[in-house]
Amino acid sequence: MLFNSFSYALFLPLVFVLYWLPLFPKRRCVWQNGVLLLASYAFYSAWDWRFALLIAFTSLSSYWTALRMDAGEGAARGRWAALNIAVNLGILAYFKYAGFFVDSFVALLTMLGWKGTPVALKVILPVGISFYTFQALGYTIDVYRRKIVPSRNPLRFFAFVSFFPQLVAGPIERAANLLPQFDQARRFDYAQAVRGVGLILWGLSLKLLLADRLAVYVDAAWKGVEGLSGLPALLAVLFFAFQLYADFYAYSEIARGSARLFGMELMLNFRRPYLSVSFKEFWKRWHISLSSWFGDYVYIPLGGNRKGAARRVMNVFIVFLLSGLWHGASWTFVAWGFLCALFMVLLDRPLGRIGGFRPLKIAIVFSLWALSLILFRAPDFGSALKMFSALGFDGFSELASFGLGRAELIFALSLLLLLAVQEGLWERRGELIAAKFYRLSPFVRVLCAVLVVLLLVLLGHYGIGNDSRFLYFQF
Amino acid sequence: MKKFILEILTIVLAAGALVALLDARRVFAQEEGNNHTGKRWYYLYKYAKQKKNAIDVLVLGNSHAYTGLLPEVLSKELGRRCFILASQGNRITDSYYMLEEALTVCKPKLLVIETYTIRNYRQRQLSGIDLSCQFQSFENRRNTWLKLKSTPFLFSVDNAPYAWSQTLRNHSYLFDNPALVSYNWKHPVPPAYRDKEYLGRFVRFTTGLEDPTLERYRREGPPEDGAAMTVGADAERSVQKILALCKKKGIKVMFLTIPMYHGHIAHPEALHANLAPVIGNYPWLDLQAPVYNDFFTPDCFENTYNANQHQTSMGAYKTSLLLARFILNDSRNK
């Protein structure tokens, strides 16, 4: 069930109504958590009912080992933590990386002269497995570090792991932030709900107006990468950078908006990353929940920047290589992670020396990021190389031959311009503008919402048979 | 909470009303030139208005039925008015709901079901061209209540809104075909049908199989296999529903298999065996049976080797004559 599907447009109000039904006033929290748990499992089972078994197992193992950890002392705590981490990573490794490791191993053997027939592994990748596995892992590690006390209420804990707004593509929530929100009955907050609807409409606009429209061009360009050259290739790279951002940002905003309808607050996942002036800043603004997860659970335990420059560089590379692998079981993702680490290690200092001219720094960071995404998008190294070598400035007349006609291409470019203006405005006075908007009379707000819905209906890129999944579902 | 729900309802209703307005004005309607399904419903309702029981023989099917039968010939031979209620790419599940609506305005004495609609498919999982055909058929039906009732059986939750709204379905015309949007905006009423009498036929193919195609049959063999043309659970259920409905309304039922070229389908006997359990003891004229191979000469078939082969007007003429004779000879239809 996609956030941009009609089934979600029915599902969300239905769960909303059930959730806020004034039943069982004395056990309101149990009712609300029960509704969320059932809704989340129904939501996840819409892809494949077997996935629900997997998330139930992940929840159960994390819940149980956390209790065992809490009951134990010293080495016993460590053993339970290690066991849970091994189980969770084992599941992730099997479902996401088994094929990759086997293929890589076979390729290595073939290079060494082996001529056997490899066994083909057919493992389906459960949607969002990387997201909820990391969320569960974070909980285990936090309990081990005694940062939080383990949950003793299975209903709350299971609802926390499977909370449907952020289940399949994050934000990867920290137990310290989300779990306590399940502890008490939520009260309906009008302002929070209105802002939730605002976030959902904003997310849908990003997805339907921009991301899916850019996807048409990007997919067509990559499909014909063999014959691609010049400006069309450059535009494909630029469009993909914005497609990825708009798509994932849209998902995160819809997730946050949906959560607010239930009185829950999820963390911010994107904070205008394309206005970053250094790569360090970029990673503090892009996919914040994952970057901070790697920071807290990998980078800092490895020593962070406390053990000298060489160790810091090594830690940065470890984190980014893992991050690359997290994004996909492919060597192109690993290479992308390597490139990101390289940018951070080599370029942040020179960027700092450029001085105060912000637009230049923003342009450099964005351009290099967009180029690195060639590896992110490419199905293999060969295609990535072709895309790199195709970049240029000729072929203007061919721009409209990649799925988007002239009018739609101009429309897409205008939307990008609008987005740039909006990001710039929000960077300076976003909170102020939002606060002013939500202070408008309900009539004006409703009118704005109707206009947005109408815009989405008429200008959105959607339709029967459109493969409009969110990009980050595959991770 | 009340205020919030009211605001949301206002947004949904206002946006819905605006979309409904665009639908009513047909701003995103596709070109009307070839909408023979709409024409069929128009004339069916027109005849019903003129006279009760205006139609005696009703034929249900898809493009095989409306290209493979000449209802004028059939009507002349039987001395009764025959009408083809078919839509492109139709499956028997949709045929049931078309029949249900048709029976609100007419009461035929005999229902003929063309068997090409009885296939192996999952109605709510149709996609691509099959789904487009289903939308077209659904859109042309006129009874809103019956359409509403049939929606959950014909479409998945995600496809249902597209079935109801041209605006949702064709909004991309704004970029792809702005001239049509502009034309529709200025012409909100579709052009009127001017035929004096229309019984549902649609002759598309006049020339038959040509030598290169016949040579291809000889070289490559049949493109379709009767053994693979199985009947799915959805189709079987729909046939049973049609039979039950007709029984309740006192309408006789027969089945008709309009043939494709005999070199087109391997193992026609397997196709017959696949359909037989569903059809049971009902009268069935299977013109795909090898006994008719010589009668249906190559000029009876659309010049194509593709999977979906229709009949030419010659084929339709022969089929109509055989069907008329079959109906007249079947003692149950006396």
Image (tube, rainbow, N blue to C red):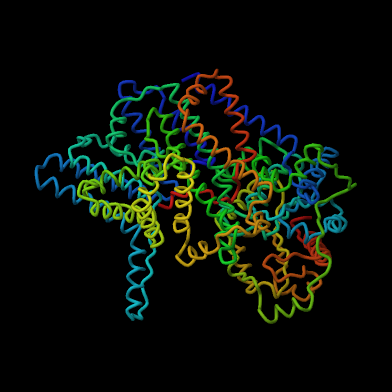
- Which residue is located at x 66 percent, y 54 percent? A400
* Position of residue A423 in the picture relative to residue A147 (left or right): right
Left or right? Give the position of A195 relative to B110: left
Q: Pinpoint residue B254: horizontal percent, then vertical percent.
A: 71, 57
Q: How many marks?
A: 0
Coordinates of residue A307 in the picture (x, y in percent): 20, 49
Of residues A436 and B41, the one nearer the viewer is A436
Report x, y in % for residue A205: 55, 38
* A442 to A234, vertically: above or below: above
**Front-most of residues A24 and B273:** A24
State which quadrant residue A41 falls in: top left
Note whether B145 is above or below B237 in the view shown.
above
Q: Is residue B233 left or right of residue B317?
A: left
Which residue ends up furthest to the left in the rendered image? A74
Residue lying farthest to the right in this orientation: B196
Instruction: Tell me where residue A233 appears, x and y as whole percent.
Output: 57, 58
Q: For residue B219, what is the image quadrant?
A: bottom right
Residue at the location (82% across, 38% down)?
Answer: B187
Q: Nearer the viewer, residue A138 or A350?
A: A350
Specify the quadrant of the image occupied by residue A114.
bottom left
